[in-house]
Amino acid sequence: PQAVVIAGAGQGGLQAAISLRQHGFAGSVTLIGAEPGLPYLRPPLSKAYLLDGNAEALTIRPESFFASKNVAHLPETRVEQIDRAAREVRLSGPGGGRNLPYDHLILATGTRNLRPPVDGLDCACDLRTLRDAAVLRDRLTKRQRIAVIGGGFIGLEFAAVARKLGHDVSVIEAASRLMARAVSPLMSGHFAALHRDLGTKLHLGQPAVGVDGDGVTLVDGTRIPASFVLLAAGVRPNTELAEDACLETGNGITVDANLRTSDPAISALGDCASYPDPRTGRHIRLESVQAATDHARLIAARIAKGDMAEYAALPWFWSDQGDQKLQIAGYAGPDATEEEVAEGIVARFDTRGLVAVETVNNARVHMKARRLLEKGGLADIDAMVDAIIAA
Ligand code: FAD
């Protein structure tokens, strides 16, 4: 293809542009992003940035990258519509008011915060963008009673920072345990103990039903007083562009093992893409830097070099809460079992054997687990677990 258009200038969209040029792609590359400024890293928004306010440290590539690599970056510009027949996208915003032709289109539109059916949510803050994080940072300069709706990674990372800054913090989680979608019950328990030790009040198994200027009401009528409320109850993939263009979607934009949508001239990546897990064939959608980056690299190699390798990267993830770094190597579905194989190391199994390893403050074991799981030597589970612990 001569012209690649990338819709969404986040972690994955920018990586696609970087990798296209690394692979020697000589056509035009246009990166279109709805947000202002240069593409930035989101993970520090709930971690270091809240403490240091250093927005420059989040920039992934400096302004000079775009000129030197001949990548056209259009900030504050949205892709409004895809015309698949004409192979054009319609843009709005400062870079908009025109149609842009493509030979290949990459959808990297990410997610937006889920708004659960809770009364009064308008007055709750979000934590998705740099702009959101700047607002939160401002609020944290004054002593606050904070209620966090959602006991997932982002809510808990924020809660730990807010406690460190001396605020009164409550976390409300509808499920009976923390980070229930992503980690084992043992890890949920470990982190519940950590947050309680830090002085955070946890309300588990009770959804919030109302938010007002004075706090949050839970389903059983309990009132959690709060001067401000953070909503961190998960996200929704931005699939509207794809849906309007009649591309296949489910829990995200559906792609095949080459990360192509139901239209082979359009790929999708990262948080918005639902792709076949190479280990089970089942479609999954991951919200991680790893998935966005590895997806982008595979798509770029296909476009630039015609490389038709199927996506096979091993998922990995991290989350920093207080002084504890949780790391996950591999991917465990909802039916996986768990076993604590040593202190702070939880192995997860399904019918195929060892599928994931969770560690706390143990980068060596995490890296070892990644290497072993990548090789896929699932047969001798005991030997594998021994090898991981002996790292
Ligand atoms: P994004 O980076 O979200 O980028 C999508 C971009 O597309 C956005 O800028 C959006 O404005 C833009 N867009 C959407 N629609 C359009 C349109 N129609 N036209 C133009 N632009 C559009 N992951 C980890 O692995 N570890 C962590 O510790 C971690 N911490 C996180 C903490 C926070 C606070 C957040 C919010 C996320 C965190 N993540 C973490 C997740 C990680 O940041 C995401 O998985 C990653 O950014 C996904 O990249 P992406 O390119 O798919 O989407």
Image (cartoon, rainbow, N blue to C red):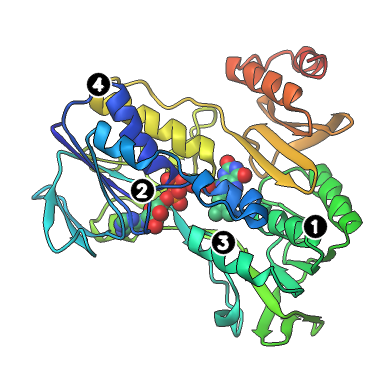
Q: Is residue 349 left or right of residue 117?
A: right
Question: Ligand 1: does it lie within 8 Å of the C-beta at label 3?
Answer: yes
The residue carrying pointer 3 sits among few (fewer than 14), some (14 to 19) or many (20 or more) residues within 10 Å by Cα, namely many
- Between marks 1 and 4 in the image, the one whose residue lies nearer the viewer: 1
Q: CA distance from mark 2 to mark 1?
A: 32 Å
Q: Is mark 2 within 8 Å of ligand 1?
A: yes
Q: Nearer the viewer, mark 4 or mark 3?
A: 3
Whichever of labels 4 and 3 marks the residue nearer the N terminus, that label is 4
What residue is pinned by disc 1?
164
For residue 359, above or below residue 10: above
Residue 150 percent location from the top left of the image: 68, 64
Distance of mark 3 from mark 1, alpha carbons?
Answer: 17 Å
Q: Which residue is mark 3?
A: 133
Counting other residues with Cα less than 10 Å from the Cα at mark 4, is it few (<14), some (14-19), or many (20 or more)? few
> SS class of the residue under badge 3?
helix
Q: Mark 1: few, some, or many residues within 10 Å (few <14, many ≥20)?
A: some
Residue 214's spot in the image, x, y percent? Answer: 72, 87
The image quarter containing residue 155 is bottom right
Q: Secondary structure at mark 1?
A: helix
Which amino acid type corresponds to the residue marked 1 in the rendered image? Lys
